[in-house]
Each structure stands twice: as structure tokens, then as C-alpha cells.
Image (cartoon, rainbow, N blue to C red):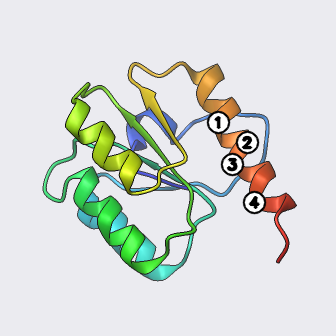
Amino acid sequence: MLTTFKKYFSDFQHGVAYHVETATNGAEAASVLRRGRPDLILLDVQMKGLDGLALLKQVRAVDRTIPVIVVTGRQNGRSISEALAAGIFAYAPKPCDFVQLEHLVGLVISARSAAPA
């Protein structure tokens, strides 16, 4: 799992042993993506430097199959519709409801493990 929410998710306790990579900004996240493909990306739309929508476009140019959950406090309808058009798995508003987020992560992981190779 790759997330740009280092502050929120570096100690994310979800009851499942995931390898979590974190990035503090969009450029760092892009660098992590060049090293390998995560099973899931948790992405904030509003980041310093390379914003989340620009990063999402880069992700989709490389691999359209990586599930992305957008978590953001920015309630901008245009941003949300752009993210949805780019094929995100889900949108979750901040502040995060960690039970809901854990459920979304579980749905992604179980769907990916059930998919034929």
C-alpha cells in the first residue's frame, strides 16, 4: 500500500499485516511508484508540489489497474469528479472515519486477492 498520509497512516492499526510505504508529497510518491507497483494507493488531492490529481494522472498513465482511494478534506466538486473520472475505487472525506477507511482497504485487498491472476 502506498499512501501520502504519512502523518495519519504510518501507525495505521488495521488488524492485517500490510507493507505500507509512505510519502510526504506527490513527488516522493511518484518516486516510490517508480520502484514498484503497490496493491493500493491512498491519496490526498491537496499536497504540496505535485498535487494529488496530477499524481493520479501519472499513476493512471503507468497502470490503470492500481486501486486508488482518495482521502481529502477539500470538498471541491470538480476535484472529486476528476478523481472519479480517473477511475478511483472510492472517495473518503477527512477527517477520516478509520473504521470506514479500514473497511474500504479490506474491500480493495480482498477483491484483488480474489481476482484471477
The secondary element bearing badge 1 is classed as helix
Residue at point 40% right, 19% down? 95
Res. 23 image quadrant: bottom left
Residue 74 pos. (x, y %): 24, 28
Q: Are marks 3 and 2 in contact (CB under 8 Å)?
A: yes
Q: Check disc 2 and give the amino acid type.
A: Leu
Q: Check disc 3 and give the amino acid type.
A: Val
Q: Mark 4 points at which residue?
A: 112
Residue 72 is left or right of residue 90, and the answer is: left
Q: Are marks 2 and 4 in contact (CB under 8 Å)?
A: no
Residue at point 37% right, 77% down? 61
Q: How far apart are marks 3 and 2 (CA)?
A: 4 Å
Q: How far apart are marks 4 and 1 (CA)?
A: 12 Å
Q: Distance between the residues labelled 1 and 3?
A: 6 Å
Residue 89 pos. (x, y %): 55, 47
Q: How crowded is mark 4: few (under 14 residues within 10 Å), some or many (20 or more)?
A: some
Residue 117 is left or right of residue 52, and the answer is: right
Q: Can residue 39 be seen in this view?
A: yes
Q: Mark 2 points at which residue?
A: 107
Q: Do the residues labelled 1 and 3 touch (CB within 8 Å)?
A: yes
Q: Is residue 13 visible?
A: no
Q: On screen, 42 above or below 63?
A: above
**Along the line of sight, which residue is nearer the eye, 96 or 60?**
60
Residue 112 pos. (x, y %): 75, 60
Res. 86 image quadrant: bottom left
Which corner quadrant holds the C terminus?
Answer: bottom right
Q: Name the residue under label 1.
A: 104
Q: Mark 3 points at which residue?
A: 108
Residue 8 pos. (x, y %): 45, 33
**Along the line of sight, which residue is nearer the eye, 51 or 35?**
51
Q: Residues within 10 Å of mark 3 (few under 14, many from 20)?
A: some
The secondary element bearing badge 2 is classed as helix
